[in-house]
Image (cartoon, rainbow, N blue to C red):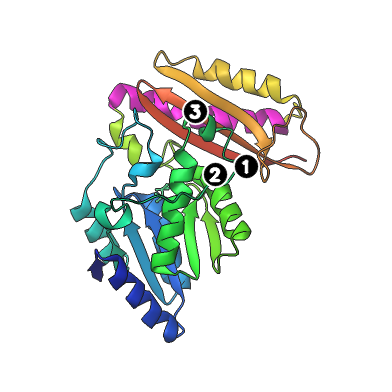
Amino acid sequence: MKIIHNVIQMQAIADQLKKKSKTIGFVPTMGYLHNGHLSLIARSVKECDITVVSIYVNPLQFGPKEDFKKYPRDIKTDLKLCRQQNVDYVFIPKDEQIYPVGYMTEVRVKGITESLCGKSRPGHFSGVTTIVNKLFNIVKPGIAYFGQKDAQQSLVIKKMVKDLHMPLKIKVLPIIRELDGLAMSSRNAYLDAKYRRDAILLYLSLKKAKHLIAKKLRKTAKIISQMKRLLSQSEFATIDYIVIVDADSLNEVKQLKAKTKVLIALAVYIGKVRLIDNIIVKVD
Ligand code: PAF
C-alpha cells in the first residue's frame, strides 16, 4: 500500500493506471474509519482493479461554529485498517495544496442542497461538491463509493456528476449499523455513555415511521408527530429536522401514494452532538 501526499504525484499515478486500462475505485473519506467506510472499501476492492482511499478533513464543508477543529482524527489506525483491506493507495493531501493562497473556485449544486442538512448547515454542500470534484480530478476514478447514511450528500454528488458530464459511476451502499441500530459515524465518538443510550432513538423513530406506513398511515404530518413523540423521551434530544420526502427529488411529501419511494430523514442533536440517519421506504 502506498501513501501519497502530493496532488501531482497522485494524478501521475492515476494517469499511469488508466493507460494500463485499470479501473480505479475510489472511497473519499475524512478518516477515523469505521465499518461503514470499510464496507465501501471492501466493495471497491472486490469490483475494481485498484482502490484509492482519500483521507482529508475538508475545512470548506464545516461552518464557522462547527466541529472542524475537534473532528476525530487517527491516521495511524486508518492506515492499518486500509492495509488490512488491501487498499492500493491512500491519498492524504495537504491543505496548502488543496486550498493554496489565492484559491477562488467553488462548485455548487442548487435546489436539492437547500433543504434538510443544507438548511441548517449553509455552505456545507458546496464545500462537499468542491472537494469531491477536486478529488475526482486528482484520483480519476471509474467508480466512486459513498454511504447511504449521508443520503442527501449522495444525491447531490450524483447530480453534480450528471450535470457536469463527469466520466465516472457513483455507487451508494447501505448504512452499516451498530448492533442496537445506531448508524455508524465518526461523530459517534463524541457520545458519552448517557448520550450513546439515547442516540438509538433516531433509528427507533425511523423504524416507528416504517411500521406506521406498513399499517397504512398515509399522512406524513401524523407520522412525523409520532416520531417526535418518541424522540421526546430523551431529555438530551433536540430535533433539527425530520422530513418525509421523495427519495429522488427531496421534494416534501404530504400524503403517501402507492408505488412511490420516500426518504425519511432526520437530524437530531443528542446533547451537542448532531447525528443524522435515514431510511428509504417503498409505499405499497
Ligand atoms: O462523507 C464524507 O466523509 C465527506 O463529506 C467527503 C465525501 C469525504 C467529502 O469531504
What's the magenta region?
A: 192-214
Percent of width and height locating residue 18: 44, 80
Mark 3 or 1: in front is 3
Q: Is residue 176 visible?
A: no
Choose between 199 and 54: the one closer to the eye.
54
- Give the Cα distance between marks 2 and 3: 15 Å
Which of the numbered marks, if any, corresponds to residue 280? Answer: 1
Q: In the rendered image of this protein, does residue 95 appear above or below residue 113? A: below
The kind of residue tagged 2 is Ala
Q: Which mark is residue 120?
A: 3
Residue 151's disc number = 2
**Which callout, 2 or 3, points at the residue further toward the start of the chain?**
3
Residue drawn at x 32%, y 65% is 85
240 relative to 245 in the view: left or right? left
Q: Residue furthest left?
A: 76
Residue 66, image x and y in percent? 34, 31
Q: Residue 122: x, y in percent? A: 48, 33
The quarter of the displayed image where residue 263 is located = top right
Q: Residue at x 50, y 50 (%)?
A: 107
Report if residue 126 lies within the magenta region: no
Local packing at callout 2 (Cα closer than 10 Å; few below 14, some 14-19, many 20+) is: many
Instruction: Report whether the residue tagged 1 is closer than 8 Å to ligand 1.
Output: no
> What's the amino acid at mark 3?
Ser
